[in-house]
Amino acid sequence: MSNNDMPLDLAWNRFHKQEEAVEGALALSHWLLENARPEPVMECLGSDSRVIELDFSARATRLGALDLTEAGASEGVNRLIAEYGAGAALGRYAEDRGCYSSPQFLGEGQPRSTHLGVDVFVPAGTPVHAPFDAVVVVVALNDGHLDYGPTVILRHDLPGAPRSFFTLYGHLSMDSLDSLSPGQKIKAGEVFAQIGDEQENGHWPPHLHVQLILDLLGETKNFVGVCAPAELPFWRQICPDPVRILHLPEPAASGVVLTS
């Protein structure tokens, strides 16, 4: 079995038996923390960049904050970035949010509301760079309401790493898909995509959803970016926090609330 086609039910069975959900996942996570030397995913995420971290939690929404799907969210994010003199705003990993309201997030059990990636809010058209040498494995349009919109998944085969891993990029521009195809090689630091606008990115304020994935679990077009809160311990093994591995800058301000 290759390291991108572990069946989801088998991964769950391993997890329930208190084994690694995917063999070698923990070793890879530790290796990446110690050895990864990524290029910035965007120029505004370099080591000297100034960013802020936004609070889109369900609690903030209940207390009156705007969520990401409300009218005025784009303007509100831009206003906060300008007020703090930042180059970008980040949305948190593992945050339980109230904005995932479309049918795709609902099911027989607990609704999916916990974010498995990091969001980078920047203007539409901002270039996206590969953090590591990569091979394109997925180029897809996930055009459901509040889905990823144009989506790219890259595979990374780093020298010395215990296994391959993947990064997912959601909410891109339609043009980004035109120049990419599976099997295409991309160098670390190379621009391979741009941020999409609200009409093409799944109807979100312009931003990049970037997610670290240790096994694609057989997926060939899309990959879950939001999980049920009770399932977070499982998904943390498959999709660990990308902040430290991608060396994202420390926010100048955290927990900034979006208001109208």
Image (cartoon, rainbow, N blue to C red):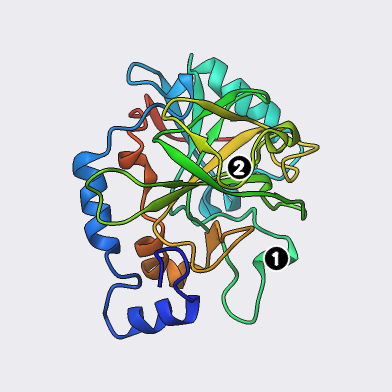
Residue 205, visible in the rendered structure: no
Q: Amino acid at mark 1?
A: Gln
Rounded to the nearest whole Å, what is the CA distance between mark 2 and mark 1?
23 Å
**Towards the viewer: 218 or 199:** 218
Are there few (<14), some (14-19), or many (20+) residues within 10 Å of tag 2?
some
Task: Indicate which disc, 2 or 1, sits on the residue closer to the N terminus.
Answer: 2
Q: Amino acid at mark 2?
A: Ala
**Which is more foreground, mark 2 or mark 1?**
1
**Residue that badge 1 annotates:** 104
> Which quadrant, please, contains the N terminus?
bottom left
Residue farthest to the left?
Answer: 34
Where is residue 134 drawn, in percent x and y? 45, 40
Where is residue 48 drawn, in percent x and y? 34, 16
Tag of residue 65: 2
Where is residue 171 drawn, in percent x and y? 65, 41
Q: Is residue 251 left or right of residue 29?
A: right
Q: Name the image quarter holding residue 126.
A: top right
